[in-house]
Image (tube, helix red, strand yellow):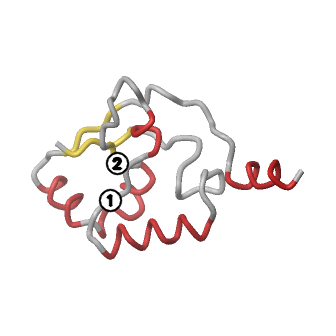
Amino acid sequence: MLKVFKECCKNCLLSKDRIVSSKRAKEIIQSCVENQTHFICHKATMDEERNGSEIVCKNFYDTLGHRSQMVRIAHRLNMVEFINQTDSEKLPTHTEMSKKKKK
């Protein structure tokens, strides 16, 4: 089963509120596309209840999932499970963290 969050987290890699630089975000996305894989939401990897589960980022699934062979196969086989997030807390963005470091 390919698990996908039902909604985007507040620090989605594909948003301006991401926790990494825009350069790093582009590298991650490019790697996912080139390797026919998908992006695992950082909220899932940090969630102790989910034990570091691999849960696909909702925004990645919606916007770039069609470029991932695994996502396409799971979709065709009706093997996609949409799940709720347990952690909706917004983390400091990359921009916010950079500003703090400069002070």
Relative to 34, residue 46 above or below: above
User: For residue 75, what is the image quadrant?
Assistant: bottom left
| Three-letter residue code for mark 1 | His
Relative to 16, residue 31 above or below: below
SS label for mark 1: loop
State the mark number for residue 85. Answer: none
* Residue labelled with disc 1: 38
Name the one closer to the observer, 75 or 44.
Answer: 44
**In the image, is 17 to the left or to the right of 71?**
right
Name the one closer to the observer, 18 or 59.
Answer: 18
* Residue labelled with disc 2: 56
Residue at image coords 30%, 37%? 53
**In the image, is 2 to the left or to the right of 95?**
left
User: For residue 21, what is the image quadrant?
Assistant: bottom right
Determine whether label 2 and label 1 are within 8 Å by CB. yes
Residue at image coords 58%, 46%? 11
| Three-letter residue code for mark 2 | Val
